[in-house]
Image (cartoon, rainbow, N blue to C red):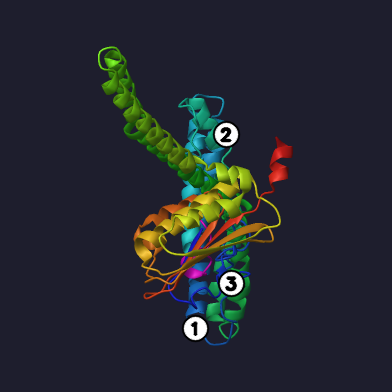
Amino acid sequence: MTVTSSSPGAGAGTGIGTSPGGGTGAGTDAGTDGVGATKQDAPPPPARFAYDRYTWKEISYLLSGLPVAVLGFVYTVTVVLVGAGLSVTVVGLPLLVLGLAGSRLIGKGERARARALLGVTVDEPSAMPKGRGDGLFVRLWLGLKDPVAWRSVLYAIIRLPWGIVGFAVALAGLVALWPVLPYIVRGMTNVDRALVRALLSPSDGLERRIAELESDRGVVVDTAAADLRRIERDLHDGAQARLVALAMDLGLAKEKLQEDPDAAAHMVAEAHGEVKLALQELRDLARGIHPAVLTDRGLNAALSSVASRCTVPVKVTVDLPDRPAEAIEGIAYFTVSELLQNVSKHARATRASVDVWRAHNRLMLQVTDDGQGGADITAGSGLAGLAERLDAVDGVLVTDSPTGGPTTITAELPWRDRGAIHSAR
């Protein structure tokens, strides 16, 4: 999840907390109500005697409900009964699966109608899962056990009798009960709202969560593949090429050892320098994978080492009661490292600060500089990739970078105890 703000006051209302140093920290409740659950729809205004646009939309929903319900009921009953009846034949189960797929489309249409006329915003369920195999029986089984389609079937069956009642009441109300009709249709459409939310929405946010985790898994896999390609390229172009040249130099020195000892000694001295350079490149590569100082001494020492390589003075403050899990600690290190690289390359700052602290079950990171500002996640910069990596582990990235500065970038990661990870192993 990514939250972006462009002014110092833009963080209000996004779940941003206060750091020990007075900065801001990203919370996880921005735009959500629990894991994977969207905000509740704003309730319609109270019903009144006047026929406003909300009342006419609700009347239109009830009047159009009968023909829609009849079509949905006829389709559903026909397909389910025919498919179930022919299930003993070859064509029965495929026909039933196709009918259930059509019921999904009916549910999608009902969600759109409720969204347009009742103001009910229901997230679309996740797409049909794809079987790992391409076999017919795998696809049939996935279609038969699709919970979204079966809930749409149940909705179509329930909707017909209720649609008849709603159509009759709305039509009679327009003729004889028009003074109190707004109150009547409000009560009846509240039942429709409940039916849509109960039967046509994703199951308790689980399907949305599955889709989100699938997307996050793709980001993690792509990131890991890119890191492997980078390591392979660095080894091939750097240390490997240098070691090959070193082997050739030592071979030439061995040949000259008898006939020209002085030249051989000079070549050995050059080879010794190449060995030092190769070792330095390997150390830099290893530091890019996982620095030894992070493993041995934790975030405080590791971030201080990163800060010492920044082009501007950096104050590092780490206030942690204990060390988080290795994976979270590594992500925190590389997040701060990348943000400080941005400070060196783009910020034109004279000073910067890094604050790290724990807030309940979250690890908070905040990098502040007094540079020119203008950092924007949505501009497709390196911040966008960093936000995707944090999102893959349920993290948050918040930018507060007005033009002219200062810039405050806050990252939030889930806290996982190091001891708990070891005990689980």
- Residue 126 vertical position relative to residue 267 in the rendered view, above or below: below
- Residue 127 vertical position relative to residue 351 in the rendered view, above or below: above
Q: Position of residue 388 (x, y in %)?
A: 46, 52
Instruction: Tell me if label 2 and label 3 are in contact, CB under 8 Å.
Output: no
Give whichever of discs 2 and 1 has the lower sequence position: 1
- Residue 307 vertical position relative to residue 267 in the rendered view, above or below: below
- Identified by mark 2, the residue type is Ala
Question: What residue span does the magenta drawing correspond to?
Answer: 114-123
Question: Does the image show residue 125?
Answer: no
Disc 1 packing (10 Å; few <14; some 14–19; many ≥20): few
Which image quarter is the C terminus in?
Answer: top right
Q: Is residue 176 magenta?
A: no
How far apart marks 1 and 3 lie (CA) works out to 19 Å
Q: In this image, 153 relative to 423: left or right?
A: left
Q: Residue at x 69, y 48 (%)?
A: 417
Query: Which of 404 and 193 lies nearest the eye of the viewer?
Result: 404
Question: For residue 327, which numbered disc appears in the image?
Answer: none
* Secondary structure at numbered mark 2: helix
Question: For residue 169, which numbered disc appears in the image?
Answer: 3
Residue marked by disc 1: 52
* Secondary structure at numbered mark 3: helix
Q: Nearer the viewer, mark 1 or mark 3?
A: 1
Give whichever of discs 2 and 3 has the lower sequence position: 2
Give whichever of discs 1 and 3 has the lower sequence position: 1
Q: In this image, 202 relative to 95: left or right?
A: right
Q: In this image, 286 relative to 376: left or right?
A: right
Residue marked by disc 2: 84
